[in-house]
Structure formats: structure tokens, C-alpha cells
Image: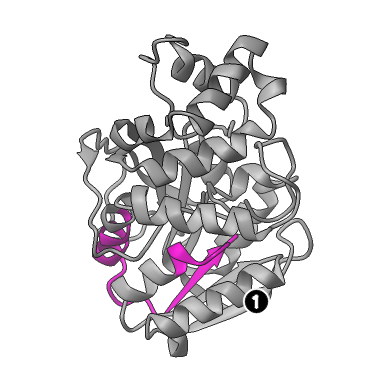
Amino acid sequence: MTSSTTTSHPGRHHHDDGHDDGHDDELAALLDLDAEVLGAWLTTVTDLVADLRPDAGTVVDLGAGTGTGTLALAHRLPHATVVAVDRSRAMLDRLRAAADRAGVGGRVRTLEADLDGARPATGAADVVWAASSLHHLADPDRVLRDAHDALRPGGLAVVVELDRMPRVAPDDLPDAPGLGSRLAEASSTWNVHPDWGPHLERAGLVLDGVHHLTTEAVDGRYARTWLDRVRTRAHELLAPADVAALDRLLTQHPAVLDASPVRADRTVWLAHRPDTAGAPASGRPTGTARTDAPTTPDPTHDGGAR
């Protein structure tokens, strides 16, 4: 999760998303695993960015977290410098190490800043990326206005959100039929976000398109890691019988999860700063695009979800 995800996870946790208020090693590991297992959406979205801004020189990743989005952008835009912004020094240190290992460290700059504070000193940008980060902020509209001001004319803004927490638990457990659905319903308030389209437009940006992406995979590691984290708050979410069933699943039957698909649904908004006040940038389409086909994770892809 992205952005200071996602899911994404930066800035100040303005409302409850099921995570601790700090960026800890456990959350960082989960974000990296999310990238590995459910990060295929990044290929689609960074391809869109490269098509729209192939000449991008500076990209800003707002709420960069562990840097999976930062790395995907750096790989896909080989001439760009990516400025990774996050309030957590530990996350940025982890990001820096990952960028060096991936061979893109020379084109990644880290900036420690709280997005709920003053506008970060990123300089002018060709692309501003915010994945699973805006919904955490106290004043996301102000951050979007700052993004507009940071973008060069014609520059691209990309906002990504998980539409709901990943679906990981099965519904066909013999002693707890429907557990997966009840857990999904109970956690449905963790990642609430608005339709960012009107917010982007109020910030002075022109909406280019909205894409809906589904990523699905079978990976027991991800399911177990996610449910282990959920278990710490299960008593707040589930009836006692379901809490007991979740415990049995994790302690007695964890192999069940090796065959259970995990799924994540995301919405992506693309918008640009007009070339001139009130006029769309030349050559850029407007309107809404929808992509509903599931994406298949690429085992060689090292980008990820924020």
C-alpha cells in the first residue's frame, strides 16, 4: 500500500486505515510484498505515464513509502530524476538502499517532509505521483494545489488509490463459511477515499482519464502476512466465532491460503496542468477511460504498490 502507502501510508494518518500511526519494519515488509505479488498494475500505469510524458525530466513521488512506485517510475522513465517524498526517515533510508540495489540510485533523490506541513521543496516537476497517499492527509486539496503549482505547463498528475483492502481470506472454510466476505466488509472503512477527479479539477488540473485496475494472484505469503496484521485488531472487526476461525486458519491450517487467490482493485486518475490558464494542453485527450481486465503479476517486475 503506495503511497505513503500505499496501500498505501504517508503523511499523517488522518483517518483510520488499519495501520499503526508509525512506519515500522512490519508495514514496510508488507508494502514490499504487496509490490511483489500485486504490483502488476504499476506496469500499466507507468506505461501510461511514459506515453503521456516520455520526455519527463523530474518526477515527484508524494508519500513514497518503501519506494516501489519510485523505482517503477525510475525504471520506466530512464531519463528522469525521481524525487521521493515521505515523512519517515526510516522509509526513505530503505528506499535509498533499494534504489542503489536496483541501479537507479543516481536518479533518485529523497526528501523528508510531512505532506500535512509546508509544501515540500521538490522544485518544478513534469510528473507528480501520489499513490495511496492523498486519503491520509488532513488537507488533500491543498496538496493537489501544491502539485498543480509544482507541475510545469503540460505536466502530469497521477493519483492512485486502493478501492478496498485486498481480499485475501477464502469464503469456503468448512467451519467458517463466508469469513472472507465478512472480513472484507468489516475492513471496508480502512481505505475510504473520494472520487479525486473533482478535487483535481478544483486544483486547476484537467482530468485526462480514470482507470479501474484489478490485480489478482495466488500467494500464501501475502495472505498470511496480511491476515497476521489484521489479527491484531480482529476483535474490533469480527464476531468472536470469526476471530476464533481466523486464529485456526493462521495457526492450524495456513496451507489453505497457498491455494486461495488474493485480489486488489485500484482506481487511477490522470490529469495535467494546462499549457495556458483554462486551456487544455495540446494533444492531450480528455474524458474517462476504463480498464477492467485483471492484470497478471510479472514475476520479473520489481515495482510495487504504494
**Outermost residue, bottom direction?**
106
Q: Is residue 266 above or below residue 133?
A: above
Q: Going 43% across and 49% down the picture, which residue do you hit?
A: 206
Amino acid type of the residue that numbered disc 1 sits on in the rendered structure: Leu
Q: Position of residue 254 (x, y in %)?
A: 43, 34
Q: Position of residue 302 (x, y in %)?
A: 34, 66
> In the shown orientation, is residue 302 left or right of residue 187?
left
Instruction: State yes or no: residue 78 in magenta.
Output: no
Region rendered in magenta: 45-70
Whether residue 147 sits left or right of residue 214 in the image: it is right
Q: Is residue 50 magenta?
A: yes
Q: Is residue 137 above or below residue 150?
A: above
Q: Quadrant of residue 287?
A: top left
Q: Residue furthest right?
A: 117
Res. 221 visible in picture: yes
Q: Residue at coordinates 46% horizontally, 79% vertically from top-left? A: 99
Q: Secondary structure at mark 1?
A: strand
Q: Say if 80 sits above or below 19 in the image.
A: below
Q: Residue at x 28, y 55 (%)?
A: 284
Q: Give the residue number, with chain letter if any, for mark 1.
A: 111
Image coordinates of residue 256 in percent, x first then y, are: 36, 29
Residue 27: where, in percent of width, then height? 61, 53
